[in-house]
Amino acid sequence: MTTTKETTTLETPITEEFDVLIVGAGISGVGGAYHLTQQLPETSFVVLEGQDSFGGTWWSHRYPGIRSDSDLHTFGYRFKPWSGPPIATAEEILKYMGEVIEENDLAKHIRYNHRITSANWSNEDNHWTIEATQTDTGNVKRFTAKFLWMCQGYYRHSEGYTPDWEGMDNYEGKIVHTEAWPEDLAYKNKNVLVIGSGTSAATLVPAIADDCKHVTVVQRTPTYYTPGANRNDLAETLRELEVDETWIHEIVRRQIIREQAIFTKMAREEPEKVRKELLAGVRAILGPDYDIETHFTPDYRPWRQRIAFIPDGDFFKAINSGQASIVTDEIEKFTKKGLLLKSGEELEAEIIVTATGFNMNVLGDIDFKIDDTPIDFSKTVTYRGMMFTGVPNLLWVFGYFRASWTLRADLLADFVCRLLKHMHKNDLEKVNVILRPEDKDMELLPWIDPENFNPNYLTRALPILPKRGDKPEWQHTQDYWREKDDIPAIDLDAPEFKYH
Ligand SMILES: Cc1cc2nc3c(=O)[nH]c(=O)nc-3n(C[C@H](O)[C@H](O)[C@H](O)COP(=O)(O)OP(=O)(O)OC[C@H]3O[C@@H](n4cnc5c(N)ncnc54)[C@H](O)[C@@H]3O)c2cc1C
C-alpha cells in the first residue's frame, strides 16, 4: 500500500495520492475513518467533506428540536457506548461524533470545505482522480485514490425538496424549509403553518408550539407515529447494577435489534394488528374525542414508510395543549396571507414551514466517469445496495430505513476493510461486480419495491437510482437481520467479483 505523497506536473495542479478517499464526514464517513485506522492502519486515506464541519445530517439541519428518531444505542457506533437517553438531539449526536474523532485522532484525516465535483476512473492507472472545489477559497484540489468509499448520504444537503405550489411568490409572509432554517427566524407569538407530516414536522412542532401564537400542521396524508418514553429500562437497570457501559451498550443493542426484528415481522405478517396497536398508542394520549381517523390513520400498511417515534409523546401533548393543531387536506394554492385548501378552507400565518422532505440524489451529485466516459448509475445494477456493475473500486454506504443507518455503516465498513485486505494480499488492483451467467435473464427492477417501502422522496428518485434484481445479492434488502450474517460471510472469490 502507498503512503500519501504529493506529485506535481507542469500541466496539472498538485495531486495528492491516497489508497482510499472517503466522501463525507457524516456518521458513515467518520465511522469509515475509524474502522480504517483500526483494521488497516497502514492504509493512507483522506476524508473530504463539503461542509465546514463533521456531522452530515446533524450539522446541516438546524431547525428547533432536531433530534434522532432512532435510539442512539443502535444509531451510535458499535464501538463507542452511548450512555444518554435513547433519543438524542443533533447537538448530542455531534458531541458523540466529536469524541470519536478526538479519541481516535481522526481530525488529521478530514478536510472540510472540500466539495467533490468529479471522479474519473482510469483503467490504465487503476485509480480514481477526484476533483474538489474548496468552498471557502474556490480553489480546485486534485486527488487520486485507489478506492472510493462513498459516505455522502442519500440526499442533497444544500437544499430540501419543496413542491411548486401556485401563488408561492404572492405570499407575503416567510417560507422556510426545515433543511434551511434561519438562525434568527422570529416565530414568537406568530401563527405558523407547517406543511408535512413526517418526523421533521413532528419534531419541530413541540419545540416551537409554546412560543408561537399557534402552529397548524397541514398534511395531505397522515403518518404512523409511536409515542413512548425516552428511556431504556434495561439500560437503567444495568446501570444500577454498575455494569460496565461497554457491556450495557452491547446488551441494549441486542435487545433493541431483537425487538425491532419482532416488530418488523409482525408488521409484515399481521399489519392490521400492528395498525390497531399504533393507533391505540395515539388514542391513549389524544383521548376518545379526537378525530384520529382523519388525522392519524394512514392508508398504507405500517412500515411502508418510516414510523416516527415521538419521545414522551411531546407532539401529541402540543396538540392537547391547544398550541398546535392538524389539518388534513390538500393545498390548492398559496394566498397573500397563507394557504387556500382544496376543501375551501383558508389558513393564515406569518410563517409557512415546508417540512416536505429531501431531494434525494445519487452519490453526491458528483460527475462520475470511467476513462472520461460519463457513468449513468440508472443503467447499473446494484450489488447488495453497495456496489454497482461496471463501476470499479467504489462502495456506497446506504443505510437502513427500518433500523438505524449506522448498523449498516459499521457492517459495510468491515466489508470494505476485508475487501481491501483481500485485494492487497492477492496483489489485485481493481474489483468490479458483474452479473453471473445465471443472472443474465434476471428482471431488472427499480432500486426498491414500492410495495415494500414507498416514501415520496424515494419514489421521486427511482428513475435516477441504480437497478435491482430479484435475488438478495442484487438488491438493498433493507433487512439488517439477514445482512448481519450475510455480509460478513460474503465469499470474496465468488463469481460476482471480478478482479484485475
Ligand atoms: C432530520 C433527519 C433525521 C434523521 N434521523 C435519523 C434517525 O434517527 N435514524 C436513522 O437511522 N436515520 C436518520 N436519518 C437519515 C440520516 O440521513 C442517516 O441516518 C445518517 O445521518 C446518514 O449519515 P451519512 O454519514 O451516511 O450521510 P449524511 O449525514 O447525509 O452526511 C453526508 C456528508 O457528505 C457530505 N457530502 C455529500 N456530497 C458531497 C460531495 N460531493 N463532496 C463532499 N462532501 C459531500 C455532506 O456534506 C454530508 O456532510 C435522518 C435524516 C434527517 C434528514
Image (cartoon, rainbow, N blue to C red):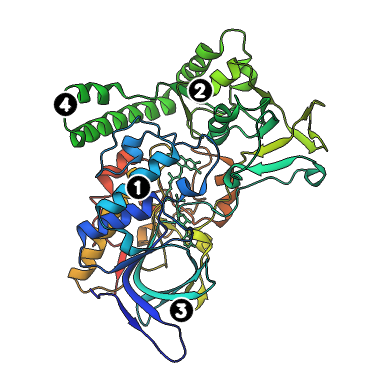
Q: Quadrant where the N terminus lies? A: bottom left
Identify the element where label 1 is drawn: helix
State whether label 3 is within 8 Å of ligand 1: no
Q: How far apart are the alpha carbons under marks 3 and 1? A: 37 Å
Q: How far apart are the alpha carbons under marks 4 and 1? A: 25 Å
Horizontal arrangement in the rendering, residue 232 relative to residue 181 (left or right):
left
Q: Which residue lies furthest to the bottom in this view?
A: 10
Q: Which of marks 2 and 1 is nearer the N terminus?
A: 1
Where residue 97 is drawn, which disc sits there?
Answer: 1
Tell me if label 4 and label 1 are in contact, CB under 8 Å: no
Q: Which of marks 4 and 3 is in front?
A: 4
Name the residue beneath numbered marker 4.
242
Q: What residue type is labelled 1?
A: Met
Q: Residue at x 38, y 49 (%)?
A: 27
Q: Earlier in the sequence, mark 4 or mark 2?
A: 4
Identify the element where label 4 is drawn: loop
Name the residue beneath numbered marker 3.
371
Q: How far apart are the alpha carbons under marks 4 and 2? A: 31 Å
Name the residue beneath numbered marker 2.
314
Residue 433 seen in render: no
Identify the element where label 3 is drawn: loop
Q: Which amino acid does label 3 sit on?
A: Asp
Tell me if label 2 and label 1 are in contact, CB under 8 Å: no
Q: Which amino acid does label 4 sit on?
A: Glu
